[in-house]
Image: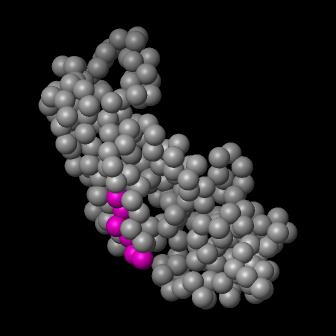
Amino acid sequence: MKKPVTSKGRILTIGEVIQQDVRLAAVLVQLGHIDEQTGACWVTGGWELINIVGTWTDVAANQGIEGDSGGIIESDLWLRSIKHTVQRPNAFAGSILKAQSDYYNSLNPNINLQLIINSSPCNYLISPDYTPLENLAERFECDCPAGMVLSCGASIQANYTNLRALAADENPTIATVTLSAIRLPPGLYGSCDYTRAVQILKSKGFLDQECAGPCG
């Protein structure tokens, strides 16, 4: 079943992908995942979620916690979104106020994250400096509307820190950043260099023959 790829609530087009990653655009064309009339992108492949988890079991402030992502990435992934959640299972446990407390805490959890993805041929410095957790999703959506490709074998370096002391019932506190991605066929992205990608896009009319810019 075809499913449109969306960005900020609208359907992503091949022109937007070309502006950000010519090789990814060529892969989508080779897979037949582009509507040749509208340029809209769609997918049929499976989704994969990568959770990067940091857990605090001490209430002191300014603790550095290494994020656990479960090892290296085992297939080429087209990263589409970044989300976060903060869980405090014991905070307000059994209280009618728990849902409200968790919601407001998630808006400003006082947790910062350093996030670097070591991928070939690019290393993505998503957040080389410690950045408030709640800022990541918004900045990713604005700055990377077409997402990015994480190659097979990529590794994730993530470090959390809490800026305030935790209350006794906030032990444990669990911060999770979730990377939502679409699986790409093995080897297709890695075997398509820039020159080949431009040739593919020009042959299908998605790039102007005189330059490497998207048509229209």
Q: Quadrant of residue 75?
A: bottom left
Q: Is residue 44 left or right of residue 47?
A: right
Question: Farthest right residue?
Answer: 37
Locate the N terminus and report the quarter of the image it occupies.
bottom right
Question: Farthest top residue?
Answer: 96
Q: Which of the two residues, 22 or 95, is positioned nearer the viewer here?
A: 22
Locate the C terminus and report the quarter of the image it occupies.
bottom right
**Colour setup of the view:** one colour
How many numbered marks have been drawn onto this rendered protein structure?
0
Q: Is residue 160 left or right of residue 14?
A: left
Q: Which of the two residues, 16 or 204, is positioned nearer the viewer here?
A: 16
In the rendered view, would you say 89 is above or below 5?
A: above
Does residue 46 belong to the magenta stretch? no
Q: Which of the two residues, 212 or 184, is positioned nearer the viewer here?
A: 212
- Indicate the position of residue 13 as horizontal and vertical percent values: 72, 62
Look at 78% across and 86% down and name the residue there: 209
Q: Which residues are magenta?
A: 116-121
In the rendered view, would you say 12 is above or below 67?
A: below
Look at 30% across and 27% down and name the residue there: 88
Look at 73% across and 82% down and name the residue there: 211
- Indicate the position of residue 102 as horizontal and vertical percent values: 39, 23
Q: Quadrant of residue 166?
A: top left
Residue 87 visible to the viewer: no
- Indicate the position of residue 95 as horizontal and vertical percent values: 35, 11
Residue 197 visible to the viewer: yes
- Indicate the position of residue 190 as horizontal and vertical percent values: 48, 81
In the rendered view, would you say 154 is above or below 164?
A: below
